[in-house]
Amino acid sequence: MTDRCKEKIASSVRDFRLPRYHEIPSVGLYLEQTTKYIAQYLDPLQEGCISSSMISNYVKKHLISNPVKKQYDREQIAYLIFIALAKNVLSLDNIALFIELQKQTYTAQRAYDYFCDELENMLYFVFELKDVLDNVGMDSSDEKVMLRNTIIALSQKVYLNKCFQAMAEEREETKPEKP
């Protein structure tokens, strides 16, 4: 892999940041607005990882509560961001169990903000944008260990996808033109 390719891979997450709980709109968002809001944050990792039909499916499967007056609130959007990313490495049944565990131990805000911090921490480490992992959180509950392992798997998957994408693009750019 060339240095240019490695730089392209690293730059794909260099400025990645999820909104923290208090930054998610406090006013309800309609389905299309919710989809666009989430996609603007997640597309740098994986394009098309959330759609309106997916959101409707998550409501039907009771992963999130029904929207109130067709609007999704801050907590629902936070859960949707988690679901959209976690579904890359976990089944929906396991995500449902994860959310159930989280509700028994942490508030949605605390769990979501921890998820954001840990995801960014792990992505920057996996993409070699920093040399040492930060110690995120104060305790090491079973739930946090499970979440960290989910985030490790997700980060590794995103990294590999970005590597293969960059290598394919580089190969295409250096391919000799046909006469």
Image (spheres, helix red, strand yellow):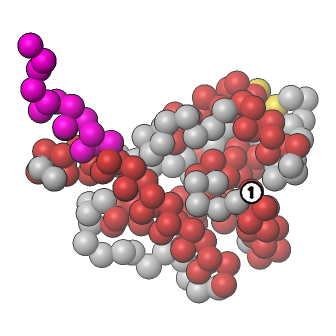
Residue at the (50%, 60%) spot, across then down: 154
Tell me the quarter of the image containing the C terminus. top left
Q: Residues within 10 Å of mark 1 (few under 14, many from 20)?
A: some
Q: Nearer the viewer, residue 94 or 39?
A: 94
- Bounds of the magenta segment: 165-179
- Residue 141 appears at what percent x and percent y? 65, 85
The amino acid on which the numbered mark 1 sits, given as a three-letter code, is Leu
Q: Is residue 78 visible?
A: no
Residue picked out by circle 1: 92
Label the magenta part by its dominant secondary structure: helix
Residue 41 located left or right of residue 77: left
Residue 55 located left or right of residue 51: right
Residue at the (78%, 73%) spot, across then down: 101
Magenta-span inclusion, residue 177: yes
Q: Is residue 44 above or below residue 133?
A: above
Magenta-span inclusion, residue 47: no
